[in-house]
Image (spheres, helix red, strand yellow):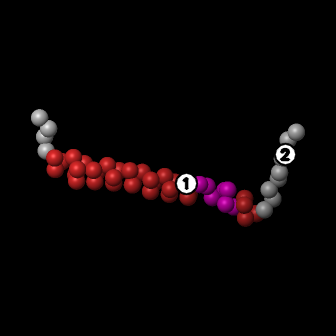
Amino acid sequence: MQNEEVHEDPAVEEIVRAGPHGTWAVAGVATFLVVLIYFLFYFLAYLPRGAVE
């Protein structure tokens, strides 16, 4: 029992042909935020504590 749908809407075909631009934008923003949080932690919390003996 297969349910095969054929999409013949030209707008949908154009969007699919354009590719996953939004996916890359979300992944880029998420990566930027992770790196930003890492550097903020390093410079604002880790370095000011100094060396632990």
Q: Mark 2 packing: few (<14 Cα in 10 Å), some, or many (20+)?
A: few
Magenta residue check for 7 = no
Q: Which residue is mark 1?
A: 23
The answer to whether residue 43 is left or right of residue 3 is: left
State the predominant SS element of the stretch in magenta: helix
Dots 2, 1 in contact, CB < 8 A: no
State the extent of the magenta-drawn residues as a range. Answer: 14-20
Q: Nearer the viewer, residue 21 or 43?
A: 43
- The residue lying at 69 percent from left, 61 percent from top is 14
Quarter residue 9 falls in: bottom right
Residue 32 horizontal/vertical position (percent): 39, 54
Q: Amino acid at mark 2?
A: Asn
Residue depicted at 67% across the width and 56% down the height: 16
Q: Amino acid at mark 1?
A: Thr
Is disc 1 placed on a helix, strand or loop? helix
Disc 2 target residue:
3
Badge 1 local density, few (<14 within 10 Å), some, or many (20+)?
A: few
- Of pointers 2 and 1, the one earlier in the residue sequence: 2
- Residue 41, horizontal then vertical, whole percent: 27, 50
Location of residue 29 in the rendering, given as x and y in whole percent from the top left corner: 44, 56
Relative image position of residue 27 (x, y in whole percent) = 49, 52
Q: Which of the two residues, 11 or 1, is positioned nearer the viewer here?
A: 1
Disc 2 from disc 1: Cα separation: 27 Å
Identify the residue at horizontal 33%, vertical 54% (top origin).
36
Does residue 46 appear left or right of residue 35 in this picture? Answer: left
